[in-house]
Image (tube, rainbow, N blue to C red):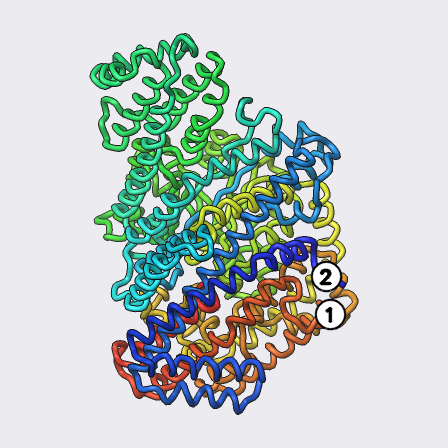
Amino acid sequence: MPNPTESAYDRVRELVVSDIDAQFRADVSLLGGLLGTILTEAGGQGLFDDVERLRHAAIHAHETRDDDALAEAERIAAAFDPSRAEQVARAFTVYFHLVNLAEEHQRVRILRARAEQRERNSRAAGDAIEPGAAASDPAQDDIDGSLSATIRVLVDEVGVDEARARVAGLRFHPVLTAHPTEARRRAIASAIRRIGELIDERDDLAPGDRTVAELDRRLLEEIEILWRTAPIRTTRPTPLDEVRTAMGVFDQTLFEVVPQVYRSIDDRLQPDAAGRGATIAPAFLRVGSWIGGDRDGNPYVTSEITREAAGIAAEHVLLGLERAATRIGRTLTLDAQDTPPSEALTALLEAQQVLAPKVTATIGTRAPHEPHRRVLLVIAERIAATRRGDAGLSYAGPEALLDDLRVLQDSLRHGGALRSANGELQHLIWQAETFGFHLAELEVRQHSKVHRQALAEIRAGGELGEMTEEVLAVFRVIAELQQRYGVRTVRRYIVSFTQSPEDLANVYELASAALGDAADEVAIDVVPLFETFADLEASVDILDRMLELDRVQARLAATGRKLEVMLGYSDSSKDVGPVSATLALHDAQARIADWAERNDIELTLFHGRGGALGRGGGPANEAVLAQPAGSVDGRLKITEQGEVIFAQYGDPAIARRHLEQMASAALLAGSPSNEARNRAADERFADLATTLDEASRIRFHSLVKAEGFAPWFADVTPMEEVGHLALGSRPARRGLSVESLDDLRAIPWVFSWSQARINLAAWFGLGTALEAVGDEALLREAYAEWPLFTAMIDNFSMSLAKTDERIAARYLGLGDRDDLAALVLDEMRLTKAWLGRVTQSEELLVARPVLAKAVRLRSPYVDALSLLQLRALAAVRAGEADLPSDDHHRLLLLTVNGVAAGVQNTG
């Protein structure tokens, strides 16, 4: 019998996974065996035996939950000499890297299997966008990426014309953030990618193929490189290093995947005209970036860095466009007699001859009777000139390029070459529409306090300080980049800790101080960022007064009354706890959406979500569907950072699935049925929300506001040591010491609790809140009918599933506050008990059985690394180590990397 709480998604996913589970197990067995060979070769049989002893002891302790068994595993970990302990920690870390890779390949196999099934269903039943068009398999549509199912829902609920209008207005805007939390070195990530490519090749071979042996030899070579590559960065990456890392995602996946996603939508919208008819799918993706633009708390991001970051991104996208145009141009060998050019194309060709006579003559010699080919190859040369900065031949902006491409496309249609017009050339048009000449829309972010300090200096007169000069220089760079690459390159200016409309007006005053009268010619859209509980509560009042600003009204008039508002998940959670933050953010979104409707504003809410659950992470599509009615409306903007960037966009198949999921969620969130359900649930459970909020906040504050909490937190977690890890260019704290939570950034706050196997930032206070409600029937009803509560319960369950109470108790024992340790452990037990009552299951991850299985398999191996980390942390806390470079600190940093790989999240 299927579990009554299990969705069709889960049931079908289990069926698909079970079909290829043997392949996954074979991958893990293969990679684990090859790693064992490398360990034996590198450290002898003794190293292999030591790793196996700790592994078996950790598995036994985890499965039996026997305290003596855990003590034995702890004894084994403590007995290693420093060198051996490091080797064992590295072995477990490399194992996790390989298992993560195997899981990623399993995901790709599942996606391919679904795509094949979807194609078979589509051929068998048709896939037209018609009212009442039956899905060939509703459960399959559930796991489909949901675009087909979503379009059908919209057609049935709002009609064909309105459904197409909503698709035309669709927008998904992921923003790569400026503080990556990827714990792996780039060298480690590169080695893992090479191993993945070899596994791909191996998949395609038949059993017994002689090439298998060669691939296994190469796998051993790459795993040896992975093993011998130092896992810890010796230097902190610069902001430009972070920019170049993010560019790898564009080069490897996004540039090619994006037009494929658009094509799949278009094929579903007009299956009978696929490849021949003019496309109607919109270029709905816009990529943003804070990398090189976010200077809030990062002194290394300067105006010059922002200029260079934009230049690097432009180089990548222009090179991509140039290569695509050249490749497609070489294939357009359509003779003028069979495919006559339009008058507009002939005029364009003549204009090109005047603009670049030598280039056009050279190309004309090779293709004298192929005008379409000649035009596109000259276009490619002009893109190259734009990249080089050749003013005489370059395009003034992406709009001019698109004008030429559309003339070419129209001419091909005019000449009857419909498939050439609407095929690869359309992909190039989509790429230019999506990425422009800038690739990612760079966003500047600065703290409101910095603006106030700079303006105080300016208003006082006299010589300006270095900080103020730098603030003004940013606006000059914005003007320069807009002139060079177009307005979309950088026009958003995000104000952290927006607490009044004056914080927003200050940006425009600073722009005028930097640019004088030219400030009016530069497009600057100020985006308020509401982060704390108090700021979320005051958000609508601040926005009301924001509309009184003349510069804001001018921008609204210029943009068609479009406005963005950003919500910060990280600091709000650290401020009032995860339960209250979740509810406060939901309430703020509802109120801001109502405010936008009253003021005739096209609102885009920008969700500052982290990768970890304590920072708003978790399955994004479920979170989107739980948003308040009217708050999404087909426009979704979220931050993507750290390990999330590479998990979602590192593989083409996974990237395509993610983009389709986000597009589907953005569309489905605004469907009448989803909005009606959310509106009714929010009203029905309003009193429940109040109780949850008040009880959880009191409980959270009883912990974090307790005297001495901050230094105790630093003692019982590797918080200080996280600061030694060169994770990103941004400092981990705002001051030299941590005396309160205000001194600590959200990423190390979440990361440190994750390392201690407590994950407190993602669940603390929930148990007390549920007990305060007390009505199990009401809570179960809310779990079944209130999407926000469902998502919260499932996400908190996911976080708790990665904890271990016995390991956590050992971390908490490193401090000298038994009262605080007891408070944490009591709340953990209470939360688990109430989650079981609400979900009616002893299994924390009842709603996600596949994930539950993965967590169960991983946990003993993470336990082994945690025991090694505890050994090192206890020595450091006892004063046995004085310098970050000694054996204990090194082991500690190694295990931080390993645990991050094992639990698959940092901050």
Rendering coords of residue 713 (x, y %): 45, 77
Report whether residue 721 is seen: no
Where the C terminus falls, by quadrant?
A: bottom left
The residue under the point 54% across, 86% down is: 819
Rendering coords of residue 205 (x, y %): 44, 52
* 556 left or right of 399 in image: right
**In the depicted structure, whether residue 458 falls above or below residue 297:** above
Mark 2 residue element: loop
**In the depicted structure, whether residue 570 falls above or below residue 275:** below
**In the depicted structure, whether residue 567 falls above or below residue 887:** above
Mark 1 residue element: loop
The kind of residue tagged 2 is: Thr
**In the depicted structure, whether residue 440 falls above or below residue 266:** below
Q: Name the residue under label 2.
A: 5
- Label 2 crowding class (10 Å Cα cut-off): few <14, some 14-19, many 20+? some
Rendering coords of residue 355 (x, y %): 25, 16
Where the N terminus falls, by quadrant?
A: bottom right
In contact (CB < 8 Å): disc 2 and disc 1: yes
The kind of residue tagged 1 is: Gln
Rendering coords of residue 213 (x, y %): 36, 59
Q: Which of 770 and 524 is in front in this view?
A: 770
The residue under the point 59% across, 34% down is: 167
Q: Nearer the viewer, residue 306 or 735?
A: 306
Report whether residue 150 is seen: yes
Using the image, tell me which numbered label, if any, was put on residue 840: 1
Using the image, tell me which numbered label, if any, was put on residue 362: none
* 284 left or right of 479 in image: right
Q: Nearer the viewer, residue 621 or 654?
A: 654
* Res 405 → quadrant: top left
Q: Which of marks 2 and 1 is nearer the N terminus?
A: 2
Q: Nearer the viewer, residue 12 or 604?
A: 12
* Res 331 → quadrant: top left
